Image: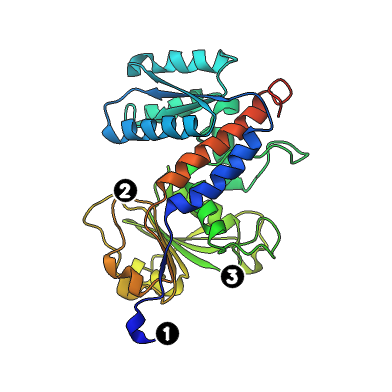
Amino acid sequence: MSVDDGPLCQTVLSATIARRIQQEITNDREKSEHSPLLVGFLSNGDPAARMYADWTAKTCVNNGFQFQLREVDREELEDRLVDANRDENVDGIIVYYPVFGNRQDQYLQQIVDVSKDVEGLNHTYIFNLYQNIRFLDEEKLQKSVLPCTPLAVVKILEYLQIYNPILPYGSRLFGHTVTVINRSEVVGRPLAALLANDGATLYSVDVTGVQIFSRGEGIRKRRHDVTEAGHMSLESCLPLSDVVISGVPGESFKIPIQHIKSGACCINFSSEKNFPPGIKEKASIYVPAIGKVTIVILLRNLLVSVRYLNPLLKGY
């Protein structure tokens, strides 16, 4: 290849990755005659939430799942969630946040029964995520549900073969250094924990500074530790990282690509374009968006919930 042939960077679209996961989900669902019912609750006027609900409905219908969108006043949402928990016909529940936009939303996340929580937001699931507990039972037959967007990133890294299948399960990112730009409680921090628990040395960057998530030298610790890295900045993390993942919501934020390691794998999970156009001159792989993978992960979590709820009755 001559220098005139352009950059080597491969742009990988989320739809390509989603199709593979979608087929796996379809194969699992077809093992039973039961068509799982997912119920979505919408209690706000957020256009993004409405769009997510529409995507969910379309993806469910296209893959043989049932979906009902229930629009309720936010003051009635708690009672409607309790009703759905008790309804044997409901297999999974998703709430389109924000509802109140404060700590009351965290309370609502705990109202959803753990057996119907397809978003992985129940305390049981969040505790397991940070403690690196991957199953709900001692026999290790029932997987713990993980939040959809962080799990979508994991599935993308698996598809891109960043995860090393030669290494044992739970350590397949050993040897990789990752920077995650975003430390929100919804996506950034759980994503950092997931990747560190899988063996990566991870730099978590937000406006308050840098934290290092790691299982230590030789990943000997059972779960990750977090240490403050006050001496570091985004600019010092990027040259060390062979994977850069960004989810900053601000339209004005752009990653300083001159600091990105040549040949890095770059993934954007923000609704904005965090990576400027020149990223293709530095990265070896670029994933510009992950939304379609996130939606199919929702269905994957629904199947996990169905097996947990009543596997014998529903044929799983």
Q: CA distance from mark 2 to mark 3?
A: 30 Å
Q: CA distance from mark 2 to mark 1?
A: 35 Å
At 68% across and 36% down in the image, what residue appears?
Answer: 136
Considering only order in the chain, which callout, 1 or 3, is on the residue closer to the N terminus? Answer: 1
Above/below status of 308 relative to 266: above
Residue at disc 2, secondary structure: loop
* Horizontal arrangement in the rendering, residue 129 relative to residue 249 (left or right): right
Q: Quadrant of the C terminus?
A: top right
Considering only order in the chain, which callout, 1 or 2, is on the residue closer to the N terminus? Answer: 1
Above/below status of 19 relative to 75: below
Above/below status of 304 relative to 12: above
Q: In the image, which disc is placed on residue 1?
A: 1
Labels 2 and 1 touching (C-beta < 8 A): no
Residue furthest to the bottom? 2
Residue furthest to the right? 139
At 47% across and 46% down in the image, what residue appears?
Answer: 293
**Residue 49's quadrant in the figure?**
top left
The reply to whether residue 246 is in sight is: yes
Task: Identify residue type, mark 2.
Answer: Ser
At 49% across and 62% down in the image, what residue appears?
Answer: 202
Q: In the image, which disc is placed on residue 148?
A: none
Task: Identify residue type, mark 1.
Answer: Met
At 54% across and 56% down in the image, what residue appears?
Answer: 195
Q: CA distance from mark 3 to mark 1?
A: 30 Å
Picture coordinates of residue 45, whole percent (x, y)? 26, 26
Of badges 2 and 3, the one in the foreground is 2
Picture coordinates of residue 19, whole percent (x, y)? 51, 47
Q: Which residue is mark 3?
A: 175
Q: Which residue is mark 2?
A: 271
Q: Quadrant of the N terminus?
A: bottom left
Picture coordinates of residue 211, whole percent (x, y)? 44, 60
Dot 3 alpha-carbon crowd within 10 angstroms: few under 14, some 14 to 19, many 20 or more = some
